[in-house]
Image (tube, rainbow, N blue to C red):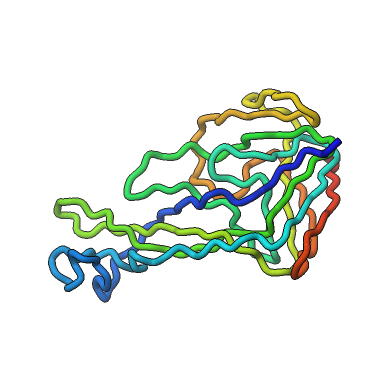
Amino acid sequence: MHTPRFVFLLASAWLLVTACQPSEDGPTDAGADGADGGADASPCNDPPQDTPPPPTVDSRQTVTFHVSGNGLLVTGANGPCAPLSFSSGADTLTLVGASECGCECSPPIGPSVGQLVRLGTYDMVWDARALVSSYRALDCTRPGPWGPICRRTRLDGRQPVPAGRYTARFAIEDTLPEVCTSTGGTPETFSCRDPGIYRDFGGGQCRASRYVDVEFDLPESGDIEIDVVIPSPT
């Protein structure tokens, strides 16, 4: 019998919006209506509005974690959070971008656990890629006396990570949350509804009762398999 597998391929990029200021040098690329720097030129061009997103590069290898032990393993998410996270030294890889806001938005529903699996044994597969980001200016100016209103959006591409020493962090629940119900299967899987609580724009790892870290070496090439045993809570 085949062990169920969770393949963690990075989802479509989310866009993160943060505040920025107009370029001190004025607009440098205002498009067809403002190419000559006239009245229709946008003051929001830092970074340039035509900045391209980083390219997405196909995965070159996979890391398969054979997870066993005790607890409920987080394998899915509601909203922009990652069931599994990775770091290298002091740097945490970005696997899921934060929610996109644009020029105006309502507070988002916070990211939360979407699926759990009761251990047993379960495979989680990472495609050894992370998000790489660039930024593009966004002109949110409206008619009125307030002057230019500039934002910037984050653009993400998925690219393979370099070889090296990494830490994988697994999210574990020790008791079944009230928002989760069994969907059966072997091992037993639970689907968790969105609790409807505002937290943040997400982009990190899903919140859980505890986390278990496992270090491993990623080679220059080739797929690898790693056994992970989740201990009982202390």
Determine the residue positioned at 32% across, 64% down: 21
Residue 229: x and y in percent read 85, 46
> Horizontal placement of 29 versus 208: left or right?
left
Assign the N terminus to one quadrant of the image: top right
Q: How many marks?
A: 0
Q: Quadrant of residue 177?
A: top right
> Horizontal placement of 84 versus 97: left or right?
right
Residue 191: x and y in percent read 65, 29
Query: Which of these two is toward me, 54 or 39?
Result: 54
Determine the residue positioned at 18% across, 64% down: 33
> Horizontal placement of 129 versus 220: left or right?
left
Residue 204: x and y in percent read 59, 50
Q: Does residue 105 sit above or below 164 in this rendering?
A: above
Q: Does residue 31 sit above or below 72 in this rendering?
A: below
Residue 93: x and y in percent read 62, 59
Determine the residue positioned at 70% across, 66% down: 89
Assign the C terminus to one quadrant of the image: top right
Determine the residue positioned at 61% across, 59% down: 130
Query: Which of these two is toward me, 188 or 176?
Result: 188
Q: Which residue occupies the extreme bottom position in the image?
A: 25
